[in-house]
Structure formats: C-alpha cells, structure tokens
Image: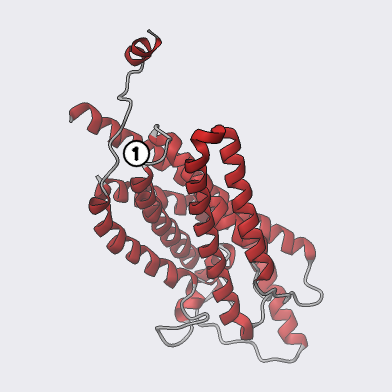
Amino acid sequence: MAQPVAGILTPQPVSMPAIPVREILPWAIFGGLLMLIALYFIGAEQGATALIQGHAVHEFVHDGRHLLGFPCH
Amino acid sequence: MTRILLVRGMLAGFVAGLLVFALARWIGEPQVERAVAFETSMARAKGEAPEPEIVSRKMQSSLGLLTATVVDGTAIGGIFALVFAFAYGRLPVRSPRALSAVLAVLGFVAIAAVPAVKYPANPPSVGNPETIGVRTGAFFLLIGVSVAAAILATQVERSLHARLGAWNASLLAVMLFVVVTASVSHFLPEFDEVPAGFPITLMWKFRVAALEMQILMWGTLGFFFGWLADRELKARRLHG
C-alpha cells in the first residue's frame, strides 16, 4: 500500500530519460575540442610548446596564468 | 537538449569567469605585483638587464587577466555542461540542481584541488624556465589521472551501491580515489624552484588567493548552471 501513496505524493516523474549518447557525441567532440583549444591558449601556449612565435600570448595572459595555477615560466 | 545545456554551461562559466576576475583583482593582483617587484629586484641584484616589456603590467593585470579568467570559465563551463548532459539520468542524483552541485564538487576536487596539492599555483619569480616542459607535462598528466580516477571511483560506487549501501560504497570509492591520486602524485617529479629569500607570507597569500579563485569558479558553475539546467529541464517535462 505504501508504494501507490508515495507515487501520488511525488510530483515529478520517477524516472527521467537520459540524453542518448548519439545526441551528445557530436557536441562533445566539436564543443569539447573547441573548449580544450581555448584552454590551451590561456594555459599553455608559448610555455612548453608554441604554435605562434614570440611571447605576446604568454605575456598577455601572464597574470591569469599564474593565478589560475598553470605552470607559467 | 545537449545544445541548450552546452550554451547554458558556457553562460554560467562566463559569469563565473567575470566573478573570478573581480576576486583576482581584489586578492590576487596585490600578490602578483609584490612577486613581480621581487623578481625585478632579484634581476637587478644579479646585474641582469631588465627584460623588454612586451605587454605592459597594466594590460596584464586588467584586460589580460580578464581574458584569461573569462575564457577559462567559459571553456570549463562548456565541458561541465557536456559532462552534465551525459550524467543526467545515468547517475542516481535526480534533481538537476543537486546533480550540478555534485559534479561541481567532483570537478573541483579532480581538476583543481588534487593537482594543486602536488603542483600548487606559483607566483612570478618562482619556477625555472628550463623545466617548463616537464612541469607542464606532469601537471596535465596529473589532471588526466585525477579525472580518470574520479570516473573510476564513480563506477565503483555505482556497482557496489546495491550490495554495500550508499554510505559504504561511497566511502570505498573515495578511498580508491585518494589512493590512486596520492600514489601517482608521489611518483611524479618534484620541483623545488623557490628562489632564496622569497617571502613566505607572500607565497601563502598568493596560493590561498589562487585556491579561493578555484572555489569561486566551481561554486558559481555548480549553483548557477544547476539553476539554469533545472529551469530548462522542468520546462521540457511540462510541455513535452
């Protein structure tokens, strides 16, 4: 008897559908890659590795890199 | 649905980045300024010519810092939303707001706290430029291991949940996470590159500021994204 009562008292559906992986995957690949590239430029470019010559990117985000805990120089 | 969550995550991360910028200006920049002054006086004492200033200090501490915190926040917010999209309906946490808070705690521990215990944030003038390659590699490797350990621990909790109950299964999962991350941290290289005479109180204040910035970042993400996701998911449930 306890079961139906609990069912009535619970306003929201008991089970929620998970978002299918095939719907998440394209977003995860393209979105995730984009986010990681952004993090690379903020956190590591012109440190251990450099895609762009010089120190301009490194120097521009210098304070943020130190305070966000990335290895800087 | 994934697109909607991703955009909300990036928005929450953007806002978190703005708040982190404000906090960094307030408690972080004074320490960076003092550390830069130490670095300059050390170079002068050694008789080195001052480095050419490519970007002015003013630019570094304003627009540069803002760019770093906002891009960092937005990117982490986006990835956070993608993880949420996968976890929703797959982890036993039903409420979107509670799930967001749980994931933020896991993210903070795995991505910010565990790597920081081994490789804490360093102010300017700390760190040998010659070891930057190894330091960067070790830092990101530790983040990778820590994230993998957190996923593994979550899986272990799920599989033991029915047999041992929530409390014991969670306790075992946490222990597994601590043992894996602590052992890997132990065997990763150590870098002792603090110059002699660097003020220890400055180091403490700098690292506390860096930690507080991470708490603010993940806290904002967990609560603000949870609220946004809850609204979206509730609207979907009511209207089909």
Whole-percent x and y of residue B3? Answer: 25, 50
Q: Nearer the viewer, residue A13 or B59?
A: A13
Whole-percent x and y of residue B217? Answer: 51, 50
Q: The C terminus of chain B appears in which quarter of the rendering?
A: top left
Identified by mark 1, the residue type is: Gly
Q: Is residue A6 above or below residue B193?
A: above
Residue at the location (54% across, 63% down)? B145
In the image: residue B240, left or right of residue B196: left
Location of residue B202 (image quadrant): bottom right
Q: Is residue B47 above or below residue B96?
A: below
Q: Nearer the viewer, residue B129 or B160?
A: B160
Marked residue chain, label 1: B
In the image: residue B33, left or right of residue B57: right
Residue at the location (40% across, 10% down)? A2
Location of residue B70 (image quadrant): bottom left
Per the image, label 1 sits on a secondary structure element best described as: loop
Residue at the location (57% across, 51% down)? B109
**Number of disc labels:** 1
In the image: residue A23, left or right of residue B57: left
Mark 1 Cα shell of 10 Å, populated few (<14), some (14-19), many (≥20): some
Whole-percent x and y of residue B211? Answer: 62, 54
Q: The N terminus of chain B appears in which quarter of the rendering?
A: top left
Mark 1 — residue? B89
Q: Is residue B27 in sight in this rendering? A: no
Q: Nearer the viewer, residue A53 or B45?
A: A53
The furthest residue to the top: A1
Q: Is residue B78 in sight in this rendering? A: yes
Whole-percent x and y of residue B78? Answer: 36, 54
